[in-house]
Amino acid sequence: MITTDKYNPHEIEPKWQKYWDEIGLLRAREGSDKKAYILVMFPYPSGDLHMGHLKNYTMGDLLARFRVQQGYSVLHPFGWDAFGLPAENAALKFGVSPADWTFGNIQQSKESLSLMGIRYDWSREVTTCLPDYYKWNQWIFLKMYERGLVYRKKSLVNWDPVEQSVLANEQVIDGRGWRSGALVEKRELEQWYLKITDYAERLLADLDKLPRWPEKVKAMQRAWIGKSQGAEFDFQVKGHPAKIRVFSTRPDTIFGATFMVLAPEHELVAQITTPEQKAAVEAYVAAAQMKSEVERQREDREKTGVFTGAYAINPANGKEIPVWIADYVLAGYGTGAIMAVPGQDERDWEFAEKFGLEIIRTVEPPAGWQGKAYTEDGPAINSDFLNGLYMEQAKKKIIAWMEEKGIGSGKVNYRLRDWLISRQRYWGTPIPMIHCDSCGIVPVPYEELPVLLPTLKDVDDIRPKGKSPLAAHPEFYECECPKCGGKARRDTDTMDTFFDSSWYFLRYTDAQNPALPFDPARANFWMPVDQYIGGIEHAILHLL
């Protein structure tokens, strides 16, 4: 059959979109025996939507309509990851305020979604830069603080020289800022952290409860959490009260430890370095601080280091072994110090060869072995009471010996580090803490939430200058201490945008609730998410 009818989108699309809206096609309703929570990725409104968004959102729309036709209660919500550097950087580039830029893009993006014919339940809309959302960021922060899961400390942080702000470890890719691409520097700053490490084992174990997650996502998370089992034990510094604590996954190789290596940032470096080595050590420490962790960890990079002049006593055999510093050891992993066993570790072998240090094998390689460091299992040699034992038996025996002697114990370590959430930028959730000279750090009372982000229209006023732009606005930071009533100062840092995007899917379940982040009963009906459609690049960011 031949027909001359033509598809006219300008007539047909508005007609059916109007009808879908009138009948509330995708309006979420609790109560069915069958539910489907279809979650699509949370866009940054730093520009209009593009074809990549269309791909993701078409899949979500198709699946949501399919489940509706099957009789499911369907939650297919949408919202805007509206705080953070993408929107702020775009606003700076085009010379407008982040708020004007963000809300203009949200309106444009909604029009684009409508042209696509994609439908959402807009009564569930979430916009993270509005006070009715970020109030709950602050509420969650205070609840975590009450439970000891939030703390503040001074430490070396990842500094992005382009964005003029710190980055969490997860936001550094191959030594560069994940957005700017700039080489990341190290700076010492006092910052707010969340204790994600308290949940490292649970995060790892519960990956086994996610049978429908792609294996590559779980593999990325397992590697990032980075569980390793071994022992933590001490080496006494010769002629000095200090002890060097190390963590090793191979404590059974201790008899082959012929030198020690400290990270250049290790707190003992300045204490144990001899006067003769002081200048060389200080110069090396300064140079190491200019390198990224990724650069320092590159396997193909030539090993460098400096002797501190100090010696430590190997507790297994009483030998004096030299203490070096080298930038391939990182302050943030383990204890920031290692016992170097060149016979059983390739990096230690390279270092020993370069600097003429002793090499002792503690594991017998197989017959015909032609390599250098032997890193596999085999019978222990040159190891006194461990001789002849294979790795697992030798590890158990040496750990028991360490515990009996009081020099160490078995230990589980993780690569995962606590989440640094402070940002020295304007466009984010104000951190709800107050600094008082008399009372110290005081939480903002719940009844005073939200701490509102002030409206700053002057683009120069929000330009990053190495510290939070809010620190230049006394009308924001000057306040009274909630405890003593004296003069105090609000915290002027803002929260990492991943704080917003780590719980938005829960707010979708009860988006209009003025009294709580969400009603647990409503969240329990919709959760868990049945289908997430988004990019794997979030596997170790807000997805973790």
Image (cartoon, helix red, strand yellow):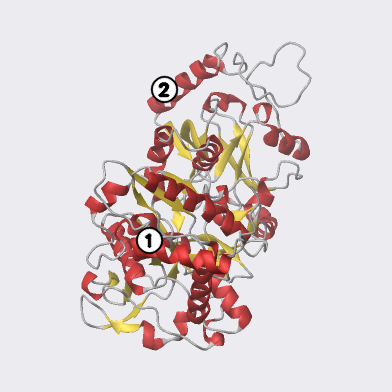
- Which residue is drawn at the image coordinates 52% and 69% (left, top)? 109
Where does the image place residue 95, in percent across and percent down from the top left?
60, 84
- Which residue is drawn at the image coordinates 40% and 58% (left, top)? 77
Residue 77 lies, with reference to residue 230, above or below; the image says below
Q: Residue type at mark 2? A: Ala
Q: Are marks 1 and 2 in contact (CB under 8 Å)?
A: no
Distance of label 1 from label 2 (alpha carbons): 61 Å
**Mark drawn on residue 400:** 2
**Camera-side residue: 404 or 242?**
404
Residue 505 falls left or right of residue 1: left
Residue 450 in view in this figure: yes
**Camera-side residue: 395 or 512?**
512
Which element carries disc 1, helix, strand or loop?
loop
According to the image, label 1 marks what residue?
A: 121
Which element carries disc 2, helix, strand or loop?
helix
Mark 1 / mark 2, whichever is N-terminal: 1
Q: Residue type at mark 1? A: Asp
Q: Residues within 10 Å of mark 1 (few under 14, many from 20)?
A: some
